[in-house]
Image: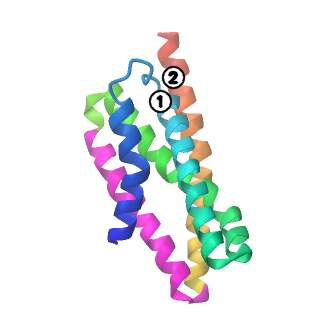
Amino acid sequence: VIVVVIEESVKFLPLALFIYKKPYFKERTDGVIYFAICGLTFGLGENIGYTLSYGAKAGLVRLVLMPFFHAAATSILGYYLISLKIDKKNKIKFILACLIIPLLHGLYDFGLLSGVTQLIIASFIITLFLSLGLFLYFSEANDLDKAELAK
């Protein structure tokens, strides 16, 4: 649990602290895109580390699974951060996202490390849904930004 909280914090907090008050961080798509890139960058470094430690097979498996996982997890937090900046009433949603994302990450890690086939499949399903969530959140952010611009 501690590792997951640290990992999610390392991906999210530096960018969040840097960018929150910047004038160019003002649209929901900004939250999704900036934080997705941050998650992808983190995932790349992590994958290189796993490849060097456990070999090419581990690196290839992670190359298929993890890029969108990290991007999605971090971009969802970014979406709720920018939503909080735009509409101060979204504190509860932001807090829930900060709790749910590490929980999903922990369930993913637990499933893979368990060696139990059903839990490994559940980890793949979490990855699939988070990856899908990345595109759904971007679409939602884009629609909300367009509606805001039309006002």
Question: Which of the 4 image quadrants contains residue 51?
Answer: bottom right
> What span is in magenta?
91-117
Identify the residue shown where x is 52% and y is 83%.
113
Q: Position of residue 94 (x, y in %)?
A: 32, 44
Question: Which of the 4 image quadrants contains residue 89?
Answer: top left
Q: Is residue 7 above or below residue 110?
A: above
Q: Position of residue 27 (x, y in %)?
A: 47, 24
**Mark 2 or mark 1, earlier in chain:** 1
Identify the residue shown where x is 45% and y is 38%.
79
Please identify the dominant SS of the magenta region: helix
Q: Magenta span has 110? A: yes
Q: Secondary structure at mark 1?
A: helix
Q: Looking at the figure, which quarter contains the N terminus?
A: bottom left
Q: Is residue 30 above or below residue 32?
A: above
In this view, the residue in front, 93 or 41, is: 41
Q: Are marks 2 and 1 in contact (CB under 8 Å)?
A: yes
Identify the residue shown where x is 73% and y is 69%.
60
Provide the residue designation for mark 2. 145
> How many residues crowd mark 2 within 10 Å: few (<14), some (14–19), many (20+)?
some
Provide the residue designation for mark 1. 28
Lateral position of residue 18 relative to residue 125, left or right:
left
In this view, the residue in front, 44 or 69, is: 44
Residue 137 marker: none
Q: Type of residue at label 2?
A: Asp
Lateral position of residue 148 relative to residue 33, left or right:
left
Q: Is residue 92 above or below residue 103?
A: above
Q: Type of residue at label 1?
A: Arg
Q: Position of residue 8 (x, y in %)?
A: 40, 56
Lateral position of residue 123 relative to residue 57, left or right:
left
> How many residues crowd mark 1 within 10 Å: few (<14), some (14–19), many (20+)?
many
Q: Secondary structure at mark 2?
A: helix
